[in-house]
Image: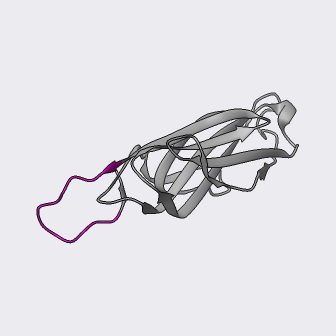
Amino acid sequence: MNADFALLAEYAAAPPDGKLYIVGGAVRRMASPAFPTAIPVMSLIVSLRVPPAECDQDQLLQITYLDPDGHAIIALPPVTIRAARNADSRTSPAFVNLVWSVQGLPVPGPGEYAFSVVWAGQELASVGFRAVVAQAQPQGPPQAAIPT
């Protein structure tokens, strides 16, 4: 199993038709006027390429949200994936699109944060964002943490 790609977005959905619907994709930076803060909603999108030999078997993925020092902030329970064989060709890989949306994602301070996706002890994907202190706004009300 390999990750074809992984990215962060403000919103995403992966319906059974195999398509991905992504809004505000490729989040790489989050600005907040103060820390600690929380991101209202953040979606992790991972597209997996599963070889035929690994299809029709339960596979466990572990997803962990890491702080700038590499310590786990959130470790999701392992997720079981079972890819069905490719209907068009039994010798071609199957593809599985996964979306995990987290509400109130904690961001304790500025720095580099990452989501790590691990299968069988091997990191398939790591995707993250940089949290920065927002520049002071000359007018208007205070702003919440906003992915940019």
Describe residue 108's horizontal placement relative to residue 143 as left or right. Answer: right
Q: Can residue 2 be seen in this view?
A: no
- Residue 65 is situated, as x and y percent measured from the top left of the image, at 59, 49
Bounds of the magenta span?
132-144
Q: Which residue is drawn at 78% across and 38% down?
A: 86
Direction bottom: furthest residue: 141
Q: In this view, does 93 lie above or below 18?
A: above
Was residue 68 drawn as part of the magenta stretch in this picture? Answer: no
Q: Which residue is drawn at 68% across and 34% down?
A: 123
- Residue 115 is situated, as x and y percent measured from the top left of the image, at 57, 45
Of 107 and 14, which appears nearest the observer? 107
Of 22 and 148, which appears nearest the observer? 148
Q: Which residue is drawn at 50% across and 60% down?
A: 106
Of 2 and 96, which appears nearest the observer? 2
Q: Is residue 97 above or below residue 5?
A: below
Direction top: furthest residue: 91
